Structure formats: C-alpha cells, structure tokens
Amino acid sequence: MSRATEYLQHVYAVIEQRDPNQSEFLEAIHDFFQTMTPVFEQHPEYIDANILERLTEPERVFQFRVPWLDDAGHAQVSRGFRVQFNSAIGPYKGGLRLHPSVNLSIVKFLGFEQIFKNALTGLPIGGGKGGADFDPKGKSDNEIMRFCQSFMTELSKYIGPDTDVPAGDIGVGGREIGYLYGQYKRLRGADRGVLTGKGLNYGGSLARPEATGYGLVYYTNEMLNANQLSFPGQRVIVSGAGNVATYAIQKVTELGGKVITCSDSNGYIVDEDGIDFKIVKQIKEVERGRIKDYADRVASAVYHTGSVWDAQLTADIALPCATQNEINGAQANNLIAGGIKVVAEGANMPSSPEAIEAYQAADILYGPAKAANAGGVAVSALEMSQNSMRLSWTFEEVDNRLQQIVQDIFAQSVAAANEYSVTGDYLSGANIAGFTKVADAMIAQGLV
Ligand code: NDP
Ligand code: 2IT
C-alpha cells in the first residue's frame, strides 16, 4: 500500500472512531478522500503536515437551546447549531438550515463541503454551516418570527461581518433572513454584512435569490459545451421546488432546455409541456403550498406521490435540487436506463456513494455539488462586498460576475483533473482544486 493510501485510511479511521454515528459527515469525508490519493502521492508534504486530520476537525462547534412560544402559547424547544469549520481563507461563510432532520452530523457534512466550495469561488470566504431541527412547515409567520428571534439571540454572540456570515439553506429564505437580521440589529446594532440573502431594501444583493439555480445551470452549460453538447432540445429532470430548483428551472428554460419535473418531499409533477417556474414560485414562495397544487392549475401536468427518482422517465440531464442522498444506486441506474447523460448537483450531496459509482461506471458527465451549486455562496460573497462598499450593483453586473465565477470554477476543476491525470473527472477536479487552496493557506499560517 502506498504511503498516500495508508495516510488516507488512517485519517478516515481516526474520524470514524471519534464520531461513529455521524453518517452524513462520514459519507462526505469518504467521498472526498476517494479523490485525494493522487494529491498525496505527488505531495507528501501534506502528509508530513497531517493536513487531513486538521481539516476534518471543525475549528469550533456551537450547540444551543432555542426556546420559542407557539401560537397556542406553549413553550417549545429546538436544538440550534453553528459549526465554524475553517477560516483559512476568510470569515466562516455558509447557510442556516431549518429542517426536522438537522443534527450535528448534517451540519458538519454541510460545513465540510462548504470549505472547498467557498475556496473554489476565488473569493475570501472560509467554511461554516448552521441550523436547527425546527420544522417550518405549517408554522405561522409569527411562530417563524419568534423562532428566528430566539435562534439569533444565541447565534448573535458568535457571528459578525468579519468573523462568520450566515445565509439561507433549506427552510431559510428571505422571510427568515429578515427576522434574523432584525433581531441581530436589536442586540448588536446595525451591521448589514453579518448576514447575506437580505431583502433588497435593507442591503441585499440583486440576483442572490436566483444565484444558486442560475449558477447550477451555468455550470451545467460549461460541462455541456466542453463535451460538444448544449441545452436546446434537452429534456431535464429537476427535483425540489424550493429556491434552487425554481431558478434552475427558469434558466434551463431560458437556454432552450425543457424541464419536465419538479418535486417536494411528498411527490412530484411531470409536465410534458415544460414546467413553468412562475407557477412553482407562486405556489412555494408566495402561497407556501405543496407542489401537488401545480397539477390543479396546469392541464398538462400530472402529480404522483413518491420520489421523482423512482419515475421511469426518458431524459438527458438530471439536476437534483432537494436534499442529501435523494438518489440511491438503484435510482441512479434508473436514470441511466432512461438516457441521462449529465448529472449536476444543485443540492448538497444529493447522490449517495452508490449513485456516484453508477454515474462513473456509465461515463455520465457528473458535476459535483461543491462546484455546481457554488453560485449561491459566490453571490453571497458579492453581497458582502457591496455591503462593505455601501454600493449596489445592477442585476446585470452581479449576473455577469456570477457567470465569470462559475466559468472559472469549471476551468479550475478541469485544470486540476488534467494535472493529476484524471481528465474529465469533475468530482476529483473540484475536490483537488478546492483542497489545495485551503491546505496551502493553512500551512502558510503555521500549525492551525
Ligand atoms: P428550500 O427550502 O427552498 O427547498 C427545498 C426543497 O427540497 C423543497 O421542495 C423541499 O420539499 C425539498 N426537500 C427538502 N428536504 C427533502 C427531503 N428530505 N426529501 C424530499 N424533498 C426534500 O431549499 P433550497 O432550495 O435553498 O435548498 C435545496 C438544496 O440546495 C439543499 O441541499 C441546499 O443545501 C442546497 N443549496 C442551497 C443553496 C441556497 O443558496 N439556498 C446554495 C447551495 C446549495 P418540502 O417542502 O416537502 O420539504
Ligand atoms: O450550501 C450553500 O452554499 C448555501 N446554502 C449558501 C451559503 C451562503 O452563504 O450563501
């Protein structure tokens, strides 16, 4: 066994022994380590620095009680988290997730991925993530507000525009960021740079709501073009119906592709005429309804319960935009049987390890989350820049910068894959390009 392989196995065993029950975190580490052998073979100095044990241990983890009153006047208690994973290249940056499944394993997997994603953007941001096991579904605006105020009462002690800058993720959009910012301001004073994804009338950036979905489609377009393909005429399966999915659907349609599905955790819509993103946006963002409602409004649409990944559809491109491990190995094989040639991840870690193996065995063009969905956090960093300058750029200016950043991420991934003789492997390319930036910054800063 080579020294590199031995080192990777040793560090994995250390992490597994420390946190045997953190399955999502271990999965993210496993996926990442699988691509690292060539780097450690060529650069034993990273082994000498024991860089992987350092990188996989968060700099700091907060877990806290979040008490809040429901509309019936009952005291409820949620569990809040913030993981400040790595500050080698800038303040901790990453979203907050509100979903009943949130636990330390999920927040750590997301924080770990965020480190390398943020490094790939080329902007000065470190990696962090947070959230709570609060379930926003079915809650009134007042309940959401009271929860956010209580959550921020504790979180405000740990964040700041130059230390840690949260944003949205599942269950956290413009409404929640507004309540969180309002409470931060009451406790610590106005400082717009402390959160991103803010409303346009109090320091938000144009194109931030669109950025993750648009960035995903720009990234997919880069993959297509590099392989003599393009969007016009392609049939696209999208999962999810939230922030990322909605704007991915809009941009695919604009570029000439046809999105035939969207979904939520109960079921999915198939619309052979092409999903209309405006109706999805109205249902999910304005009415806060269920995706089933889409079929009541659109004659060509059919609603099915269950997972869209179990539908036997014929399509060319899959864009998972819901959640982690939404595609298992059997479902990946379904996609391949249905003619899928490209998978690009809007969600974080939507493909299980078995699904990734299936893509690789079938030579699918595979765009991993940390590269494909980096557009969101990139525009968050542009929001921070605009807040510091006290200026706002136009939609077009932000969108142009986003396109440039995404093109650059793709180019870096391709270059890293070529350098380490894994040409065409965009997963390895993204991991290696992100890793070397962070590892080199850490080593330059001494034993951190
Ligand atoms: P939203 O809360 O806006 O939407 C989430 C969507 O995914 C909803 O349709 C939701 O359905 C569905 N979903 C969530 N959990 C599950 C589940 N367990 N099973 C099936 N469907 C599920 O979140 P976002 O669109 O912001 O986030 C989607 C993904 O994109 C996440 O993985 C997130 O980490 C990632 N991401 C988000 C970024 C952002 O800027 N917002 C940036 C980069 C990545 P339901 O309503 O039924 O729960
Ligand atoms: O996963 C992600 O990159 C996000 N949820 C966005 C983070 C951010 O700080 O904009």
Image (cartoon, helix red, strand yellow):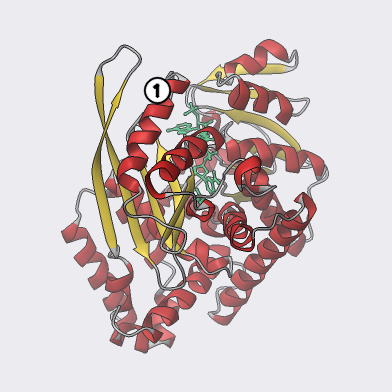
Q: Which residue is mark 1?
A: 143
Q: Residue at x 24, y 21 (%)?
A: 75
Against 92, residue 344 (above or below) is: above
Residue at 44 percent across and 82 percent down: it is 440
User: Toward which corner of the image does residue 28 lie, by quadrant?
Assistant: bottom left
Picture quadrant of residue 2: bottom left
Q: On the rendered structure, is 84 left or right of 189? A: left
| x and y percentages locating residue 439 in the rendered image | 41, 78
As helix, strand or loop, the secondary structure at mark 1 comes to helix
Most foreground residue, 310 or 59: 59
Q: Position of residue 302 (x, y in %)?
A: 66, 17
Residue type beneath disc 1: Glu
Q: Is residue 361 visible?
A: no
How crowded pointer 1 is (Cα within 10 Å; few <14, some 14-19, many 20+) is rated as some
The image quadrant where one finds the N terminus is bottom left
Which percent across, then down, holds residue 339?
66, 42
